[in-house]
Amino acid sequence: IDINTIEGSGPGGRIVKADVENHSTASSSKADSASTEKAPSSELATAATALAASAKAQATQSASPAPQSAPAPAAISPVVSGEDQTVELSSMRRIIAERLLTSKTTIPHFYLHVEADTEPLMTLRKQVNAQAEQTHGNKYSVNDFVLKAVINAAQAVPEVNASFNGDNIVQFAKVGVSIAVAVDDGLVTPVIKDATTKSMLQISTEVKDLAVRARDKKLQPNEFDGGTITVSNLGAWGIESFDAIINPPQAAILSVGAIVEKPVVVDGELAVGQRMNIGLSCDHRVVDGAVGAKFLNEVKKLIENPALMLV
């Protein structure tokens, strides 16, 4: 303590103990007051510095180019041992892989299934084939009737006979049915063009011809053009039900299972019936659930009432 700064209160202006104590208390209060007054200024300075740094960082970030999106994850490769066989992709298998990957990654699929009573169809088919043996000799397959049902249903519900096209949906004026045909090294889909103008006999003979030439690799490129809806039938392999992948740029594909005998209830009585599962895979950008159900039920109605297809 600087003694010269203390004002004495004793006799003759002498400095007493109380003067020293009072001087110490006053000095401490002034120091605290000064510290308190300076603190806000210090905090403001710190805040201003931080704000300036933040603004600079934002300006730098705005001036920088937008970050690029993360690259697509790489495909997971299998672990190959010396005993494994590596089969090079054929050109057909490569195209199949590319198209199906495009379909599953760009088309929002949804799936519908219904079961059809095929007893009326099998009865009519037996009668028609018996008559055919005496005339043109062509025997009709179950798939011939299914194709005709799909063609008629596409006319009745044209929203399914369509394609998504960016800012619009194309509803095709004609029906071109792509038929999935298994060949040695893959799958091909030749087309029955302008199918609504063709009779059951024409459809049946054309399908047989396309299938034979597909397996012999004698189809022409233009025979794959013009498809608006696809039918895939795995019934011959005993498959009862499956979901098919849409054949782009089409909006739907019908899957057909095997005809099986199973217990059914008819007029309240248990009986053995013949049933076939038919499914529809739809592009939800084009076809809503109710529309897909309407189409599938139209196919079911025609299969269960096959005489309607011969009119």
Image (cartoon, helix red, strand yellow):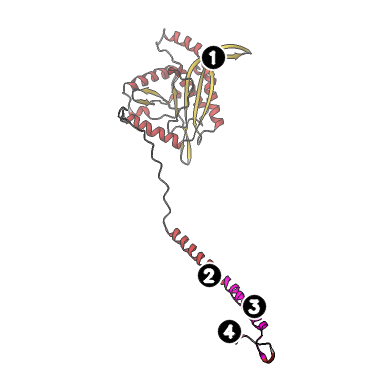
Residue 234 relative to residue 213: left or right: right
Q: Quadrant of residue 22?
A: bottom right
Which residue has dot 3 on it?
A: 25
Q: Tell me the SS state at disc 3.
A: helix
Tag 4, which secondary structure?
A: loop
Which of pointers 2 and 3 lies earlier in the amino acid sequence?
3
Closer to the chain start, of discs 4 and 3, is: 4
Residue 262 marker: 1
Amino acid residing under circle 2: Ala
Circle 4 is placed at which residue position? 2
Disc 4 crowd, CA 10 A, few/some/many (<14, 14-19, 20+): few
* 3D distance between C-alphas at marks 3 and 1: 105 Å
Q: Earlier in the sequence, mark 2 or mark 1?
A: 2
* Position of the N terminus by quadrant: bottom right
Seen in the picture, residue 62 relative to 195 is either above or below; the reply is: below
Q: Do the residues labelled 4 and 2 touch (CB within 8 Å)?
A: no
Q: Which of 265 and 124 is in front in this view?
A: 265
Q: Which disc is residue 20 wearing?
A: none
Q: Nearer the viewer, mark 3 or mark 1?
A: 3
Disc 1 on helix, strand or loop?
strand
Tell which circle, 3 or 1, labels the residue nearer the N-terminal end. 3
Residue bounds of the magenta highlight: 13-40
The CA distance from mark 1 to mark 4 is 114 Å
In this view, the residue in front, 197 or 139, is 139
Question: For residue 45, which numbered disc appears in the image?
Answer: 2
> Is the Cβ of the residue at disc 2 closer than 8 Å to that at disc 1?
no
Callout in the foreground (2, 3): 3
Cα separation, mark 4 vs mark 2, equals 34 Å
